[in-house]
Image (cartoon, rainbow, N blue to C red):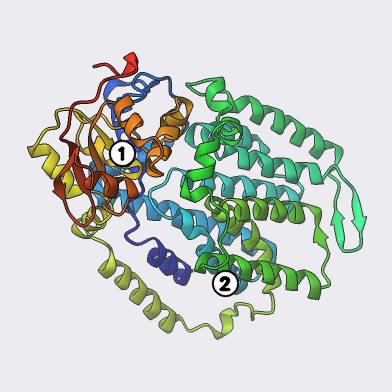
Amino acid sequence: MFLLVTLLFISARGNIADPDLWWHLRNAEYLLEFHHLPRHDLYSFTVSGHPWVNTEWLSEIPFYLSWRFGGLEGVHALTLFVIIAIFLGLLYLCYKESRNFKASIAACCLATFLARVSFGPRTILFGYAYLIVLLIILQRLRLRGDGPLWLIPPLFCLWANTHGSWLLGFIVFLIIGTAGFLPVRWERLESDRWTPLQRRKIALTGLASCAAVFINPFGIGLAFYPFDLAFRQKLNIAHVAEWVSVNFHDVRGKVVFAVLIILLIGALLRQDRWSLTDVGLVVFALYCGLTYIRFLFLVGIVVAPQISKLLDFIPRYRPDIDKPLLNTCLIAWMILAICWYWPRSAELQNSVNQQYPSEALGFLHTHPLKGRMLNFYLWGGYLGWNDRNLKIFVDSRVDIFEYDGVLKDYLDLLSLNRSESILNKYQIGYVLFPPSEPLAYALEHDSNWRVIFKDDLSVLLERSGESPTITESRFAP
């Protein structure tokens, strides 16, 4: 088990600079200071005052408290704690399925490489923690015939207020619940029917869980947000990096391919019968993970118990040949190594500085802007968190900017499409972008713009020509 924890520590170590973290901290700070949730945009000049549903408000609070009491080290510690808790729960699921502890450890280690896509201070981690709890409850129902189903509706209530991934959990619940209503005996595929009592409990639990999702401070807007994301936010899905499909040419894609091969060989060579529930879960998880890499964590959680059963050829743990002294020394060495390599605040801050324009921010503090600034999308939350007087153009909330057409304009700027008219539309007097971006290069060679700050990470340009005119009254100061 300590081997798994050490692997998780190595995989998640120092991964602190998620672009969403900064506006999550700011939202929670606002909630704890004013005792109510922000319901409209407070941070930008492009969509200022636009109604906004914060679907992750509950998960922002622990991140803010960890930052308040421990700074970046506190945020990193919370992140690592949640990741380890998820995988210990996954280890329990694997062991209950395979009854082979070593095989379960191996399956969880393989799942670690899939899950790394979401390692960092991300609110979706709490969603995966809830998923583990849901799977443990339903696994107990499947293996023992009974389980604490009464916990599931309040679980979904918490989940809906924590992260939009509750819909994934509800689909998992439907797959497991529906499989028991379908008596299947075909070749090596089977499904055991629920008893009449179990069917009633599952049906009531499902209805209660649907109702529980609507217990939230935003009402129907929060409950239907996952559907809004799926069917309305086309630009978000098309252009944000974590929504791309798996690339089988990179390391992550090769790990996914290895998982697929293991499952395929196991299905072909083993004579065991496959549960309809397991097949349904694996197919659903693979569809999600192969289509959008952000769901590879889901793939890891779902396939790990199946892989642990396929690896049952690994010798089982035998207490009679255990070497307590050697094990104690190894565990002590791992603990000391984790303590020694635990990232300190300076190292974490350096990691942040390598990804965000900290020096440019210092320049902005000493040279206040006299107009509106176009900022790089990934830097919006960071800039707003560190300079409360700065109104940003766009940040990684994405949804609120897509609704009002701002995201479309930003993407056009990235591709140098209608650049001048868009800059004039929003009365942009400054641009803070990475030097490698085409827009930054174009403006550096435009006589109407001049560089007032530049380092390896960012370039700040000021419009030196005639001031643009405002073409839309809602952007007027």
- Quarter of the image where one finds residue 377: top left
Q: Residues within 10 Å of mark 2 (few under 14, many from 20)?
A: many
Amino acid type at mark 1: Gly
Q: Nearer the viewer, residue 297 or 73?
A: 297
Quadrant of the image for the C terminus?
Answer: top left
In the picture, residue 341 is in which quadrant? Answer: bottom left
Give percent across and percent down for residue 437.
Answer: 32, 50
Q: Which residue is mark 1?
A: 380
Residue beneath the point at 15% across and 35% down: 464
Mark 1: few, some, or many residues within 10 Å (few <14, many ≥20)?
many
Q: Is residue 188 above or below residue 368?
A: below
Q: From what the image shows, is residue 367 above or below residue 341?
A: above
Q: Position of residue 399 (x, y in %)?
A: 46, 32
Whether residue 327 is visible, yes or no, is: yes
**What's the residue at 41%, 69% (across, down)?**
6
Above or below residue 402? Residue 219 is: above
Element carrying mark 1: helix
Q: Residue furthest front?
A: 447
Would residue 269 be found to the left or right of residue 161 on screen? Answer: right
Furthest residue toward top: 473
Amino acid residing under circle 2: Ala
The answer to whether residue 328 is left or right of residue 218 is: left
Residue at the (82%, 69%) spot, across then down = 272
Q: Earlier in the sequence, mark 2 or mark 1?
A: 2
Say the numbered circle drawn on residue 106: 2
Indicate the secondary structure of the residue bearing disc 2: helix
- Which residue lies most toward the right here? 186
